[in-house]
Image: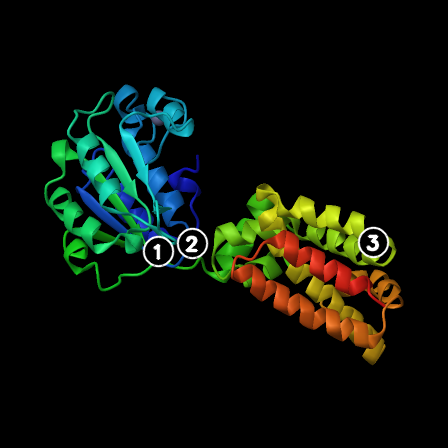
């Protein structure tokens, strides 16, 4: 589990959170607010872990500003089995189409808080996505928020302070999270993720201040190699083989991969067009593999490439609408080999 001291780019938030650790005293309700992907969830988990950690009790020479990672609560938090910790997030409930926190979730939470803590001094609850809590649930939740039973600490997480929340906001200490600054992200990627400077600067720029997103660029080259492989096989492979590729991507674990492969494919097709039309490498996105791109481009006509580029565009939109990647990839690969 990530520790508070490992969180980057949130100095202001961390100062407040660390001051709440022993010998400080936490308040009962926090609201972590900030854009998606900048580290609110990671920080909430690290904060809860640090509050449960017994290092400051067992050993006052130990730095009390973070979780130790080795005491019983730390080990159980890492394993997801600490009985006094609860994590609630929006889910798709029966007969519903969008994720939300509903009244049943809140009732269940209230019921669980009626019991005394098992191992810790108090319980800690993280409510992720409170901006997706419906009105009924929010109303039921207010009383708990006003008087959390048994000193419970509630950590609410929201991307937006929307209209539903004023009553909730007024009862919480607000902790703001911001996109991680470019320089700090670049340094982090070089020092902690082993990227070279160019890679790190590029990933940092594309990540829009989200460490999670920046991490995804780590294996970007693998994705690109796979995309080139697909462009090659789309010419020579049988329809059955193409179907198999698409089928693999449809497996749940691979859906994310499909979502990254499509833009990578489109980028390569774009570069192939540039090579064909301009005959120069200057403006290629994937300049470092210009030779491979030129080789691949020889197999396609300009018209085919334009068609494929537009098709990839449509596919990317289709994925945004959650249309089955199997269908999407099959169509793209098969269209590309049509002569
Ligand atoms: Zn510990």
- The answer to whether residue 293 is visible is yes
Dot 3, how many residues are within 10 Å of its Cα: few (below 14), some (14-19), or many (20+)? some
x and y, in percent, of residue 216 in the image: 58, 50
How far apart in space, not on screen, are marks 1 and 2 (Cα)? 7 Å
Residue 178 vs 101, above or below: the answer is below
The residue tagged 3 is 233
- Residue 198, labelled with which disc? none
How far apart in space, not on screen, are marks 3 and 1 (Cα)? 45 Å
The residue tagged 1 is 177
How far apart in space, not on screen, are marks 3 and 2 (Cα)? 38 Å
Dot 1, how many residues are within 10 Å of its Cα: few (below 14), some (14-19), or many (20+)? many
The earlier-in-sequence mark between 1 and 2 is 2
- Residue 38, labelled with which disc? 2
Circle 1/circle 2 CB separation < 8 Å: yes
Task: Name the secondary structure under disc 1.
Answer: loop
Dot 2, how many residues are within 10 Å of its Cα: few (below 14), some (14-19), or many (20+)? many
Q: Residue at x 53, y 50 (%)?
A: 188
Which one is in front in this view, the residue at disc 3 or the one at disc 2? 3
Task: Name the secondary structure under disc 2.
Answer: loop
**Quadrant of the snapshot with the N terminus:** top left
x and y, in percent, of residue 79 in the image: 42, 26
């Amino acid at each position: 589990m990530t520790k508070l001291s490992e969180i980057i780019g949130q100095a202001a938030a961390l100062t407040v959170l660390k001051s709440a650790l022993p010998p400080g005293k936490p308040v009962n309700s926090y609201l972590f607010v900030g854009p998606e992907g900048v580290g609110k969830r990671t920080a909430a988990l690290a904060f809860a872990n640090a509050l449960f950690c017994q290092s400051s009790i067992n050993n006052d020479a130990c730095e009390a500003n973070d979780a130790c990672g080795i005491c019983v609560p730390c080990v159980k938090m890492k394993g997801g089995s600490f009985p006094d910790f609860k994590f609630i997030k929006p889910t798709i409930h029966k007969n519903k189409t969008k994720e939300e926190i509903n009244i049943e979730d809140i009732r269940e939470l209230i019921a669980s808080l009626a019991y005394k803590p098992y191992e810790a001094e108090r319980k800690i609850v993280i409510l992720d996505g409170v901006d997706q809590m419906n009105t009924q649930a929010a109303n039921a939740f207010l009383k708990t928020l006003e008087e959390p039973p048994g000193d419970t600490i509630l950590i609410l997480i929201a991307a937006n302070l929307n209209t539903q929340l004023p009553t909730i906001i007024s009862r919480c200490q607000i902790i703001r999270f911001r996109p991680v600054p470019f320089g700090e992200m670049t340094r982090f990627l070089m020092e902690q993720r082993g990227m070279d400077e160019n890679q790190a600067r590029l990933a940092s720029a594309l990540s829009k201040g989200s460490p999670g997103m920046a991490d995804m660029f780590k294996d970007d080259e693998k994705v690109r190699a796979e995309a080139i492989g697909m462009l090659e096989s789309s010419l020579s492979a049988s329809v059955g083989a193409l179907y198999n590729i698409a089928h693999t991507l449809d497996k749940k674990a691979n859906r994310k991969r499909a979502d990254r492969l499509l833009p990578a494919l489109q980028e390569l097709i774009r570069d192939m067009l540039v090579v064909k039309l301009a005959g120069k490498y200057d403006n290629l996105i994937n300049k470092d593999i210009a030779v491979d791109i030129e080789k691949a481009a020889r197999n396609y006509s300009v018209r085919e490439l334009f068609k494929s580029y537009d098709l990839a565009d449509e596919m990317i939109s289709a994925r945004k609408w959650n249309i089955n990647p199997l269908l999407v990839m099959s169509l793209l690969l098969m269209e590309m080999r049509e002569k």
